[in-house]
Image (cartoon, rainbow, N blue to C red):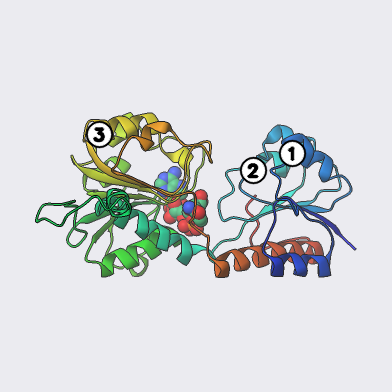
């Protein structure tokens, strides 16, 4: 029987399936393993079912036992894994695309609504019974007729676009490559990021974290936005330079932010906490029972496919 290390606790039905299939090392206390502990725990294992909270950098990968042949990541993103280091050691890396698109797009839309309609301030006032209705109380930005700029029109970006379109938003996007017109569904392509930002009344960051996208939203690029734009990020914290975004909020260059992801999670830059116009969530993108179950099942399917055939359709390195 193959031996698998599972670095984080999963939902019961997924752990039961793993127990049926493998000699499995589960993490019942859901302890966050240090890199050293992860290396030790993986001794004698054939594969690791990892999570985005595991930092599988080059140094860690180089110290994994030779028996490890697959890192099945429980996420569509894989910025936590050094793909080249894994490749050099003949370890395949897989991810869980598609199954989390809808849930994450829902949170992407929540970020847009929460930031534009001043939800944080409203919740605070309502809880404190500290409000009275008036014609100009907590006036926010209406989405209907507003331009939404999507940075990264992939699976999640397209689903956000679809919902936003139904809310009357006008969709613009930037990818490295233009989509075919049937996939664009009327969205307007911008070859340059600068051009997309200049028309983004609301920006939704949906691209992966990579060497190319780290700090792509920074002091310089924020200046291309129209004054009073709203910036939302449902992808990865590493894409945004926090100090620059907080400074843009301070200067009212940016009207509000909606964030689900942060550099150095679970900590976030305290500058955001000072702003009532920051609508912030604790990385809830894929957090529904249906989606987390489907993600773990796909991560297990990936293990199964690889251990049986030596390959996997969700291989990313
Ligand atoms: P996807 O289908 O691969 O889409 C990524 C899009 O980003 C593609 O359209 C790609 O187009 C574009 N892109 C990639 N590199 C780019 C660059 N350097 N500049 C501009 N555009 C670039 O991925 P997805 O399934 O939509 O997921 C996107 C990301 O969301 C994931 O990587 C993950 O980090 C994040 N996520 C977050 C949560 C959460 O809980 N908040 C949940 C799921 C996923 P081109 O290749 O043409 O550039």
For disc 3, the marked residue is 223
The residue located at (25%, 34%) in the rendering is 223
Q: Residues within 10 Å of mark 3 (few under 14, many from 20)?
A: some
Answer whether residue 215 is visible to the viewer in this image. yes
Q: Position of residue 89 (x, y in %)?
A: 77, 42
| Element assignment for label 1 | helix
Residue 53, quarter of picture: top right
* Residue labelled 2 has its Cβ within 8 Å of some atom of ligand 1: no
Quick one: 78 or 121, which is closer to the camera? Answer: 121
For disc 1, the marked residue is 61
Left or right, residue 251 beside residue 136: right
Left or right, residue 140 beside residue 206: left
Do callouts 2 and 1 mark residues in contact (Cβ within 8 Å)?
yes
Q: Residues within 10 Å of mark 2 (few under 14, many from 20)?
A: many
Q: Position of residue 244 (x, y in %)?
A: 34, 30
Answer whether residue 213 is visible to the viewer in this image. no
Do callouts 1 and 3 mark residues in contact (Cβ within 8 Å)?
no
Q: Quarter holding the N terminus?
A: bottom right
Reading the chain from its start, which is encountered first: label 2 or label 1? 1
For disc 2, the marked residue is 81
């Amino acid at each position: 029987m193959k031996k698998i290390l599972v670095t984080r606790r999963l939902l019961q039905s997924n752990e039961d399936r793993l127990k049926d299939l493998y000699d499995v090392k589960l993490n019942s206390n859901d302890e966050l393993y240090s890199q050293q502990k992860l290396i030790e725990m993986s001794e004698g294992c054939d594969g690791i079912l990892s999570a985005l909270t595991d930092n599988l950098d080059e140094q860690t990968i180089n110290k994994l036992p030779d028996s490890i042949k697959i890192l099945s990541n429980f996420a569509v993103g894989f910025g936590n894994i050094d793909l080249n280091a894994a490749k050099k050691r003949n370890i395949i890396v897989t991810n869980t695309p598609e199954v989390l698109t809808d849930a994450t797009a829902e949170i992407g839309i929540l970020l847009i609504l929460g930031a534009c309609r001043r939800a944080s301030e409203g919740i605070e006032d309502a809880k404190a019974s500290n409000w009275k209705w008036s014609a100009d109380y907590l006036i926010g930005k209406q989405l209907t007729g507003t331009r939404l700029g999507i940075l990264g029109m992939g699976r999640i970006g397209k689903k956000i676009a679809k919902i936003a379109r139904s809310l009357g938003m006008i969709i613009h996007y930037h990818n490295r490559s233009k989509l075919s017109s049937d996939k664009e569904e009327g969205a307007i392509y911008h070859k340059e990021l600068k051009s997309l930002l200049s028309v983004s009344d609301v920006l939704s960051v949906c691209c992966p974290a990579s060497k190319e996208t780290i700090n792509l939203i920074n002091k310089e690029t924020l200046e291309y936005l129209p004054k009073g734009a709203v910036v939302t990020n449902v992808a990865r914290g590493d894409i945004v330079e926090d100090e620059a975004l907080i400074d843009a909020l301070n200067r009212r260059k940016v009207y509000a932010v909606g964030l689900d992801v942060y550099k150095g999670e679970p900590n976030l830059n305290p500058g955001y906490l000072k702003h009532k116009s920051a609508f912030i969530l604790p990385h809830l993108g894929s957090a529904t029972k249906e989606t987390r179950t489907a993600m773990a099942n796909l991560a297990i399917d990936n293990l199964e496919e690889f251990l049986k055939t030596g390959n996997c359709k969700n291989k990313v390195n």
